[in-house]
Image (tube, rainbow, N blue to C red):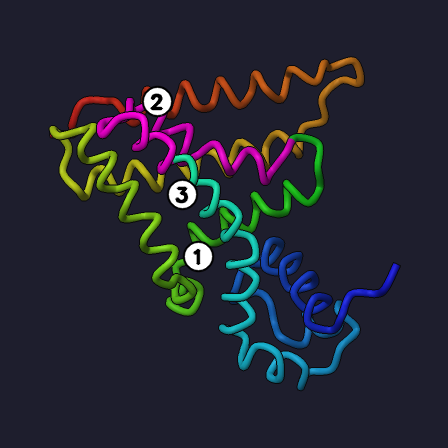
Amino acid sequence: MTNPDTRTQILDAAERLFAERGYRGTSVRAVTDRAGANLAAVGYHFGSKGGLWAAVVRRVIEPVNAAQTAGLDRLLAETPTPRIADLVEAFAGPLFDVTPHGDEDGARTSRLIMTILSDPSEEARSWTGPAEDSVRDRYLAAFKDALPGLSAHEVEFRMRGLLAVTAVDRVDTYNHDLPADTPPSAATASRRFALTFLAAAMSAPPTH
């Protein structure tokens, strides 16, 4: 097996550190020390710390966005007005697929997603581009059609809640070891429980 190239080593190290420490808590030197690279390599491959953050986030988010897009395309091909429960599964379900139970990489991905959602710094929120905006806007429109009584602001708030609750669940599942005799179906059950809860939350009456 060949060793990862320098760019990949930096991405791997940065993903771990950003997940553990957040954007502001992670220095470029800490990343290069963990990656076994020199400081200039970050500038060469990514331009800046912000460029490195964007590359790490996109590496994690792009498979999720692709699955979300495919799920919404499938639903809209079947009906112009998908059920809320189906929209929730298509939107939140991919997060369960990239963060499987018992998988350390999955837990790290969950922690990173939590950081992406919660980090208030402008630099940490500047990574999104047209592809991410398109996925968000398409789901926002679909949920608005399914929930005509809600304002766009409340629909968007609930969509962020779907992502946050799912990420918290994945981190919590990893941090609490299940008994050795726990059947594989337990992970599937957890997914069903979460999606049922999220569908109910998304379907709640408007806030007055």
Dot 2 crowding, Cα within 10 Å, few <14, some 14–19, many 20+:
some
Kindly identify which residue carries mark 1. Answer: 119
Q: Nearer the viewer, mark 3 or mark 2?
A: 3
Quarter of the figure that contains the C terminus: top left
Q: Earlier in the sequence, mark 3 or mark 1?
A: 3
In the picture of the structure, the residue carrying the numbered disc 3 is: 69
Q: Residue at x 51, y 38 (%)?
A: 95
N-terminal of the pair, mark 3 or mark 2, is 3
Residue, x 56% and y 71% (percent of image)? 52
Would you place residue 90 above or below residue 18 in this image? above
Q: CA–CA distance between discs 1 and 2? A: 29 Å
Upstream in the sequence, badge 1 or badge 2? 2
Location of mark 2 (residue): 85
Q: Quadrant of residue 59?
A: bottom right
Question: Label 3 neighbourhood size at 10 Å, few (<14), some (14-19), many (20+)?
Answer: some
In the rendered image, the vertical position of residue 25 relative to residue 167, given as above or below: below
**Amino acid type indicated by mark 3:** Thr
Our reading of the magenta stretch's main secondary structure is helix
